Image: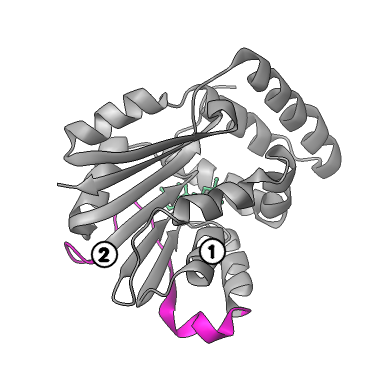
Amino acid sequence: MKYIHNEKKIKNIFDKLAPYYDNNNKIISLGFDKFIKKDIIKYLNITCNSEVLDLCTGTGDIIEYILKMHNPKKIVGVDFSSSMLKLANKKLRNLNKFSSKIKLIKANVCFLPFKNETFDCVIISFGFRNIKNKIRIIKEIKRVLKSGGEFIHLDFGKTNIFIDFIFEFVVKYFLKFFYKLNSPYKYLLSSKKQFYKPSKLISIFKSKGFILEKRIDYLFGIISMQKYIKE
Ligand SMILES: C[S@@+](CC[C@H](N)C(=O)[O-])C[C@H]1O[C@@H](n2cnc3c(N)ncnc32)[C@H](O)[C@@H]1O
């Protein structure tokens, strides 16, 4: 399957996938998704005055974990899939003591509806890979992040033939068998194969004015996190 970079198709894929998304992640990652997402949040210096932005927020996991582990002033999630946002809303409403701090916005992350230098931290977890115009999104992240602000990117990392084979097997047969959905898994596999290696990603972010502060490779490098500071 050719890697789709048509925003409408990607949005449709996530709209369809939404009801299965959290469970799929648990299966594909053998439960490590939660551990990894919580771990990356430890590296953010969030205070009670921090305004945090979670791009491609999906079902709101990152927002949930940030609120449980830190005490920001405000946290905003942006995503263009109504179905994913609906689930995020349901999940986060249950954290009612925090609900006044949370804002979920339906928008394309390439056109962020925020003023320059609004946020202290920006996170994008398993989202950057899906964005067609990488330069545009990097510019948007830089624009809305305060000078000296923190940016975390989390996604698939290095490829490893053995791990990729297992991953492909689980995605192609196991998930397809259980959920009878075809296109999201084909999309996931092709987008993963064609995504940048972490070293390439780091050099792109560096060239756009971000300083690499930390890199962590999880699960033998299948998942990679990089934390940057805006110059
Ligand atoms: C793989 S999910 C990641 C969700 C969540 N961040 C996580 O770590 O579980 C990717 C999300 O990015 C959203 N997305 C993809 N391209 C987008 C765009 N251009 N603008 C806004 N959201 C986008 C999709 O709707 C989907 O919810």
Residue 189 lies, with reference to residue 154, above or below; the image says above
Tell me residue 102's x, y (percent).
Answer: 45, 76
Q: In terms of secondary structure, where does tag 2 sit?
A: strand
Task: Look at 46% across and 45% down and name the residue there.
Answer: 127
Q: Label 2: few (<14), some or many (≥20) within 10 Å?
A: many
**Does the segment drawn in magenta span residue 72?**
no
Q: Which residue lies furthest to the top in this view?
A: 161
Q: In which quarter of the image is residue 132?
A: top left
* Residue range highlighted in magenta: 94-119
What numbered label is drawn on residue 119?
A: 2
Tell me residue 136's x, y (percent).
Answer: 26, 42
Q: In which quarter of the image is residue 29?
A: top right
The quadrant of the image that shows the N terminus is top right
Identified by mark 1, the residue type is Tyr
> Where does label 1 land, which residue?
65
Tell me residue 101's x, y (percent).
Answer: 42, 80
